[in-house]
Amino acid sequence: MEIDKRIKVVDEYLDFLKYQKNYSDYTISSYLNDIYEYMNYISSEGIDYKTIEYSDIRFYLMYLKENKQDNNSSIDRKLSSLRGFYKYLANEGVVSSNVFSLVNGPKKSKKLPRYFEYNELEEMFNVFDLSTPLGQRDSLLLEMLYATGCRVGELVSIKVDDIDFGRRNILITGKGNKERYLTYGEYCEDILNKYLSDGYLFLNKEKSKYLFLNNNGGVLTERGVRFILDRIIKQTGINKKISPHMIRHSFATHLLNEGCDLLTVQKLLGHESIKATQIYTHVTTDRLKEIYFKSFPRAKKDD
């Protein structure tokens, strides 16, 4: 089976992810890479993707581990991509069953989410030249990512009409076409109003309905957001890598550190399951100690 020509069923699956599951272009691109890497492997081994067996998959995992030297997290992600693909194939009657549902991924070492301390975010908030349209846009971009904890795909999809300025709410469509409201605060409100009354009018040459625009007036892409964040952190003294999801991690971590309950954080993040939110229960040891010694009556003896 030659892979230089796209397999029709793969294209159909990617369309399903885009138009029915509402996955972002970035996520779909990751699925595409994982599926085609797998297809190339089984093609080289003379295996038909429709009749692959459990034992064949174990050899594929050995290939990823020993030949590709993928780490456990990467292998687990690839298995997840293929599990979803074969679930689709089974539902469409292309295969008799989802053989990947029988396969457990390698054990992953649990990594705590990387996040920024609030003073680091403050340093980033202070780098913008708010006299320019792009400075206003970039400031709003960072403020809104942090103020709402939204995903980057949700951010670039915001239209001006989605915003309820009176209630400081934004209606967005998240994963699985599920709608929810994002809430933003006064800092975000100030830069939002400044941008819409000034920089946005300059950038919006094409009369776009979208909030975040590039310097040509087109809709800002997820890749564009990542480029902007990279540029922001280079203007600071912070020695950390940055990503939109790291800002989301910071949003959740800071809420929990300040006493917000887990169920509320779950709703704000748009997680369907509380399990997805529990990764954020890594309130820092120092913070826990601080609360303990401040709150527990017999933690310290009176002098």
Image: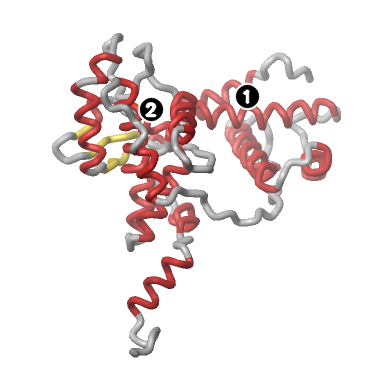
- Give the mark, 2 or 1, whose residue is nearer the N terminus: 1
**Percent x, y for residue 144?**
32, 37
Tell me where residue 170 appears, x and y as whole percent: 26, 36
Horizontally, residue 201 falls left or right of residue 301, namely: left
Indicate which disc residue 220 carries. none
Q: Secondary structure at mark 2?
A: helix
Residue pointed to by mark 2: 156
Q: Does the rendering let one see residue 21? A: no
Numbered tag placed on residue 10 in the rendering: 1
User: Which residue is at a point 38% across and 50% down the rendered structure image?
Assistant: 118
User: Compared with residue 74, is residue 9 higher up or lower down, i.e. above or below?
Assistant: above
Camera-side residue: 237 or 83?
237
Which residue corresponds to the image point at 71% horizontal and 52% vertical from the top-left?
106
The mark lying in front, picked from 2 and 1, is 2
Q: Say which quadrant the C terminus sits in.
A: bottom left
Amino acid type, mark 2: Val
Q: Nearer the viewer, residue 301 or 224?
A: 301
Task: Say which residue appears at 42% left-offset and 66% top-offset.
Answer: 287
Instruction: Name the element at disc 1.
Output: helix
Give the left or right position of residue 52, taking residue 151 as reference. Answer: right
Disc 2 and disc 1: Cα gap in Å? 26 Å
